Amino acid sequence: MVGRAAYIAVDWGTTNRRAYAVASDGTVLETLRDERGVLSLAPDAYPAEISALRARFGVDPVIAVGMVGSSRGWCEAPYVDAPATLERLAASCREAAPHVRIVPGVALRDGRRPDVMRGEEIQILGAIHAGTAPATALFCQPGTHNKWVETVDGAITTFTTVMTGELFALLRAHGILAGMLDGVVSDGAPFRRGLRRGIASGNLAATLFEVRAGLLLDRLEPSEAAAYASGVLIGADVATREDLSRRPVYLLGGGDLNVLYAAAVSELGGTPITVPDGATTAGIHAIWSLSA
Amino acid sequence: MVGRAAYIAVDWGTTNRRAYAVASDGTVLETLRDERGVLSLAPDAYPAEISALRARFGVDPVIAVGMVGSSRGWCEAPYVDAPATLERLAASCREAAPHVRIVPGVALRDGRRPDVMRGEEIQILGAIHAGTAPATALFCQPGTHNKWVETVDGAITTFTTVMTGELFALLRAHGILAGMLDGVVSDGAPFRRGLRRGIASGNLAATLFEVRAGLLLDRLEPSEAAAYASGVLIGADVATREDLSRRPVYLLGGGDLNVLYAAAVSELGGTPITVPDGATTAGIHAIWSLSA
């Protein structure tokens, strides 16, 4: 280990887990990535997991974010209602065990429609805290459930979860398009054609069937179908934003998906800006500092 | 058997099969319904299936419609391009074996978007032929893949396939909503609330996530979630039609689903009209008569 760790930060998601040994100045000293996500763990498995992390990193305090605080996780940390700041999240942590705090997610509870997030909030507010994104901005976090998040003066004010990635995964694995969507998905001509079709469609459940019809009628090559379908889904997702010409989109944490969402934002005349890595640990460190 | 059969009509779909012994005047003398659909049969199983139907019904000629004529079925009957009439379908049947004709499906090949149907065309044109629907009309055929079909003077001119039923089935069986959508789906208050939300949504992949968020935030009862989600999907589907105030919607063949689609059409200010059963055999009999 390079320096002296002050605490362990854990980004504990549904499928994946990332744990970090963090110094008191926020420097990440060591990182562990594995697949010990919430779905792979029984509720009584967490104390042993925490002990193992402490033994590995040589330090006791733990701050965890993400699905670990959900009803399917270890210990439910009730949602904070929007508008949500780092200060409110820090004040609402749940102590799951001695020296183990779980940061709550954020809920839209009383508006026109309900929505929830767990883990994304800390990445957004961490980016703002680290100065890699402005305090008032529009964010996009591509993934299984893409999040569009709006912040005002460092508070998450509203957000929308879109099941874009999940729909692609379901269609690829099951149903009429199964076996047709196993090709490479990258930002090339088939993806761009799908994007334009998805942007113009207005009826996602109909446009998706065009993938099958296009293959049957030789208007789509089998090798292009996956990229085209991904374009349709991402195009339909991004096209629902009506504010892309007014402000840039700050893209966070989606890896390869960020490239595809950036292409979609550009296709619609918007400006995508990729936020550098490190936002989640910056957010957790802010929680640590606020609670110290 | 009540009378003397002239031929066997088979509605041979992906999952189900219906076979009818039909008299020369079109009277259905006997009906067989089973699950020997295309997915359950190997390509070389069809001759034995035909022999069994002939033995059962005591007559040789067979006219089959539906997925049996697809690349996944027995013998591919190439699509007829829209506009498609009964006459063109009759002239384009494929002889799969002696005295076994397969009626082709219909394709939108050269327009803005591709689409295909197999089996639905015979039901639509059969209803028109039988006089249970007008020759120029808008049809809706709820199912795994809902079809919206427009006819002009007895010809199918354009249509749209919407994967509404498939999306519901995928979400119910897999992914984040699995286990939440097992309740009863019927036309009650939760379904109507879902309908209104789906009609207003404009972003299906986001509105579907509200089912999960609504359950987590106690805005939706677990017992209501399936009906609500069905309402969202059907509402979003029907809301894409912009012509509902101008003409009635003729609903065909969806069983319980017809009730839900009729509710959605009414909710949007349209007029649903349920077409009586018998359209498919009426259509096949028209093919028989035209080819005799």
Image (cartoon, coloured by chain):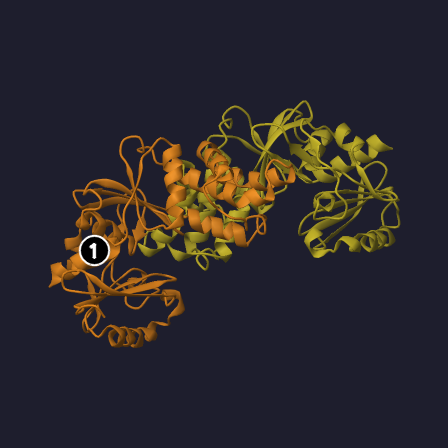
Chain colours: A yellow, B orange
Q: Residues within 10 Å of mark 1 (few under 14, many from 20)?
A: many
Q: Is residue B80 left or right of residue B16?
A: left
Q: Residue reaching furthest left?
A: B292
Where does residue A88 sit, x and y in percent of width and height? 76, 29
Secondary structure beneath label 1: helix
In front: B30, or B18? B30
Q: Is residue B115 visible?
A: yes
Where does residue A31 sit, x and y in percent of width and height? 77, 49
Q: Residue at x 50, y 52 (%)?
A: B170
In front: B123, or A67? B123
Give the vertical position of A149 relative to A217 (above or below): above
Mark 1 sits on what residue? B282
Give the vertical position of B236 relative to B73 (above or below): above
Q: Quadrant of the C terminus of chain A?
A: top right
Q: Residue at x 57, y 51 (%)?
A: B178
Where does residue A282 sit, x and y in percent of width and height? 75, 36
Where does residue B213 sit, x and y in percent of width and height? 61, 39
